[in-house]
């Protein structure tokens, strides 16, 4: 598998997971013209997008989904609850219907010739928010973003994964001391908003296992976090758990900046 994050954060979320012969776009919160440019820089194109997965119905994850449905025509896979929400959302309602593909709960869904997918629900203040376990051969890629706290189900999936993408949204001190209104601070930090650096670090030893190769930190806040703080927090958790330097590839996925094409 190969992976590229085009952007990760409230400014827009979109990434691509590639197998031997097909690819899955995960969320569509980045402009389609920019994605086309990023794909071309990697010698890829729209034809490499065989399916689209959506985690939830907030704008930073679906802002450009209608455009993708119109121009790429790849099947859009998500839960029935989220599909109904997309049919009502102004960003997607005019285009998503013909692309709709519902994921079944509790089973592996073959979404492309390379990839099978299961979803799990995570706590976030959207219509519904899900993480994904994505299987390609012997590799298991698990993504869990926009979750107010790490659930046992999410941790169980992560404990089997070769690659984990996990939210590390905010530094608690920066959030509490920052300029956000109290209502927004509460929304972010009270269990159905986002995962803090500390909470991410606490989760890491709970899913850490010998088969874990890659750990990517996603959805960092632009106001209440820095890449350096998030990285140091996760690195400290790995070191405290006895992980040798370099044994797990730790990386921060940036806001508005594409990662390299990473071989997983």
Image: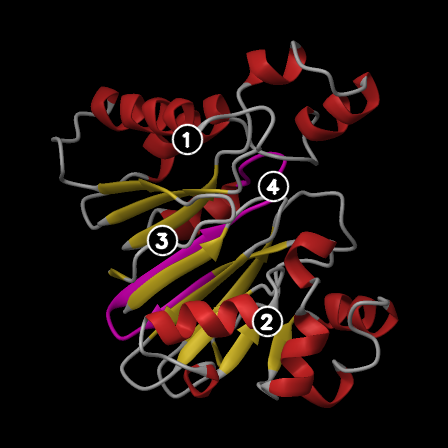
Please tell me whether mark 4 sits on a helix, a strand or a loop. Answer: loop
On residue 227, the disc is: 1
Left/right placement of residue 222 relative to residue 86 reads left
Residue at 66% x, 43% y: name it: 123
x, y percentage for residue 258?
41, 54
Coloring scheme used: secondary structure
The answer, for residue 103, to whether it is visible in the render is no
Label 2 vs 4, first from the N-terminus: 2
Quadrant in the picture for residue 196 = top right
- Please tell me whether residue 92 belongs to the stretch shown in magenta: no
Q: Which residue is mark 2?
A: 32
Question: Can you tell which of label 2 and label 1 is closer to the viewer?
Answer: 2
Q: How many residues crowd mark 1 within 10 Å: few (<14), some (14–19), many (20+)?
A: many
x, y percentage for residue 1?
27, 69
Question: Can you tell which of label 1 and label 4 is closer to the viewer?
Answer: 1
- Residues at marks 2 and 1, CA–CA distance in whole angstroms: 26 Å
Please tell me whether mark 2 sits on a helix, a strand or a loop. Answer: helix
Question: Can you tell which of label 4 and label 3 is closer to the viewer?
Answer: 3
x, y percentage for residue 203?
42, 32
- Residues at marks 3 and 2, CA–CA distance in whole angstroms: 17 Å
Q: How many residues crowd mark 3 within 10 Å: few (<14), some (14–19), many (20+)?
A: some
- Residues at marks 4 and 3, CA–CA distance in whole angstroms: 22 Å
On residue 259, the disc is: 3
Question: Can you tell which of label 2 and label 4 is closer to the viewer?
Answer: 2
Quadrant in the picture for residue 94 = bottom right
Closest to the observer: 86 or 240? 86
Q: Which residue is mark 4?
A: 147
């Amino acid at each position: 598998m190969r992976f590229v994050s085009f952007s990760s954060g409230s400014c827009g979320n979109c990434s691509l997971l590639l197998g031997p012969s097909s690819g899955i776009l995960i969320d569509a919160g980045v402009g389609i013209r920019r994605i086309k440019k990023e794909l071309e820089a990697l010698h890829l194109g729209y034809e490499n997008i065989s399916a689209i997965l959506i985690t939830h119905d907030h704008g930073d994850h679906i802002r450009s989904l209608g455009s993708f449905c119109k121009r790429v025509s790849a099947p859009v896979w998500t839960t029935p609850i989220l599909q109904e929400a997309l049919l009502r959302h102004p960003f997607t309602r005019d285009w998503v219907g013909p692309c709709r593909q519902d994921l079944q709960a509790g089973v592996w869904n073959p979404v492309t010739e390379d990839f099978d997918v299961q979803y799990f629900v995570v706590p976030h203040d959207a219509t519904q928010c899900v993480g994904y376990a994505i299987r390609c051969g012997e590799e298991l890629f698990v993504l869990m973003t926009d979750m107010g706290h790490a659930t046992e189900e999410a941790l169980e999936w992560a404990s089997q994964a070769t690659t984990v993408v996990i939210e590390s949204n905010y530094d608690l001190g920066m959030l509490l001391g920052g300029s956000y209104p109290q209502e927004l601070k509460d929304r972010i930090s009270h269990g159905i908003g986002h995962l803090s650096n500390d909470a991410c670090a606490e989760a890491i030893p709970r899913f850490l296992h010998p088969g874990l190769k890659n750990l990517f930190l996603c959805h960092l806040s632009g106001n209440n976090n820095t890449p350096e703080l998030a990285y140091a927090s996760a690195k400290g958790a790995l070191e405290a758990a006895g992980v040798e330097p370099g044994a797990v590839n730790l990386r921060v996925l940036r806001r508005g900046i594409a990662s390299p094409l990473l071989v997983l």
